Image (cartoon, helix red, strand yellow):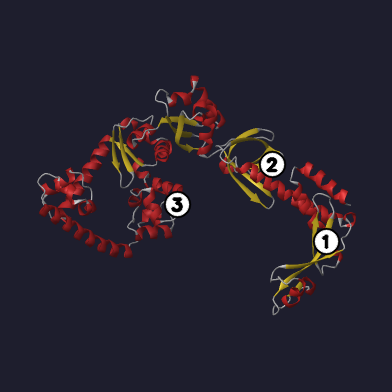
Amino acid sequence: MSKEVLSVVEIMSNEKGVDEEVIFEAIETALAMATIKSNDDKIDARVEIDRRTGNYTTYRRWLVIEDDVAIEGEPGLYIRMMDAVDEDPNAYPDMYIEEEIESIEFGRIGAQTAKQIIIQKVREAERKKVVEEYSTRVGDVLTGQVKRIDRGDVILDMGDNVDALIPRSELVGRENFRIGDRVRAYLKEVTFRPRGAQLFMSRACKEMLMELFKIEVPEIGDDLIDIMAAARDVGFRAKIAVRANDPRLDPIGACVGMRGGRVQAVTNELNGERIDIIQWDANDAQFVINAMAPAEITSIMVDEDRHEMDLAVEDEQLSMAIGKGGQNIRLASELTGWELNVMTKTAMEEKHNTEATKQLEKFTTLLEVDEDLAQILVDEGFTSIEEVAYVPTTEMLEIEGFDEDLVEQLKHRAKDALLTQAIVNEEKTVLAEPAADLLALDGMNEEMAKKLAENGVVTQEDLAELGTDELLEIIAMSEQAAAELIMKARAPWFE
């Protein structure tokens, strides 16, 4: 029988490609179960196989329990401490006391039971092997053959009995595949599931775009060019930002390729998705200007605190800058990480003149100063009462005509104004009700609107003026959902 055991282990290990130890453990489990069943499930058993000779030994075992613990189930499975110490002086609760018993013959065990256990163990080992093999390949673009299509989801055969899933939501546009087609996709995740290891792949993520460029552009693989960021409107348009680590190299030209061959190869793989290749720049303003191509930006205003930029374009370029359905500005915003507001030159001048007037009135009223002094603060770049209150005294003393007494007086008035404003705002937010246009906004519900109103965001216009980070501080949602909600609130601006 020992030779038969070794033969089974060798054959199954070679056929299934799993470690022999897994097969040994499966046979040990099968033998132990057969022993238990032959004793009407009234005992517990363990089988140990000699890995070298194939000989095996069977042990009956009892679980050690405290003397005062009530026995539940078959009493033949337990032994109390008082009796266990007679067998083993070092016995302790939850350990096993074992005694060798006669082994059943390998050839007489329930064949079906043994087969099921061995198959189960082998499958578990195969799944773990797949997880181990593919976990190191997460982040790669892999190729598989379409095995079947289930409700729009595409199942790929990756070879060696390994399947991968591309959910319908992760496909590009309306692309259709037929059984047998070879498909490339980005491996996002490998998950171990009871019915087998699951490979989740995507053709719609921005990483897919970046990895395709790495494949098509050797300079990227050689670290001569870096991909800094990417943004996609899947199936329609994408933007990718690149920089060269060698000043003699043109990163955009290298990615475009001879006669556009390289970028065209990526476009063809992504079902015709148009791709803009952008020159990355360490200067955020210049990077935004590059990202807004093909629209030409005439002027730009940066708000560091809100992480926003106002962009001005010529009247005839406004629609191009915004793009169809806000596509161009949305992609540029995602690519750069900045909230972008695009408008005509005239609109920007009017906006900033209006803001300057409001700021002048605010300083005049809240700080109780004349227009000349308020104008000096505006000209020096002060945009809020907070800045007046908390900017270092040394910086304010550098303003011509300012002395310590004046600076101290301005700071004191600013802090008093902030305190008064905070009290008023708190009273308002307790009683605030969301406006009708905020409640009617697509994607808004009453609970969200109420929460926004409590934080001073009462109207659709108030929401439109928020940055993504500010909205996320008020309402728990994904960054993408927050950005989409703000863009919906800003729709009237584009109209």
- Frontmost of labels 3 and 1 is 1
- Frontmost of labels 3 and 2 is 2
Q: In this view, does 178 lie above or below 41?
A: above
Q: What residue type is labelled 2?
A: Val
Q: Dot 2 surroundings within 10 Å: few (below 14), some, or many (20 or more)?
A: some
Q: Is residue 484 above or below residue 414?
A: above
- Frontmost of labels 1 and 2 is 1
Q: Which residue was labeled with disc 2? A: 162
Q: Are marks 1 and 2 in contact (CB under 8 Å)?
A: no
Q: Is residue 34 above or below residue 224?
A: below
Disc nearer the start of the sequence (1/2): 1
Q: Mark 3 to mark 2: distance in Å?
A: 40 Å
Decide if residue 239 is on the left or right side of residue 90.
Answer: left
Q: What residue type is labelled 1?
A: Thr
Q: Is mark 1 on a helix, strand or loop?
A: strand
Decide if residue 201 is on the left or right side of residue 392.
Answer: right
Q: What residue type is labelled 3?
A: Gly
Q: In which quarter of the image is residue 452?
A: bottom left
Residue 153 visible here: no
Q: Mark 3 to mark 1: distance in Å?
A: 66 Å
Can you give x and y, in whole percent of width and height, for residue 349 in the image?
24, 38
Q: What element carries label 3?
A: loop
Can you give x and y, in whole percent of width and height, for residue 167 in the image?
60, 44
- 44 or 269, nearer to the observer: 44
Number of the label disc, if any, that sits on residue 443: 3
Q: Which residue was labeled with disc 1? A: 58
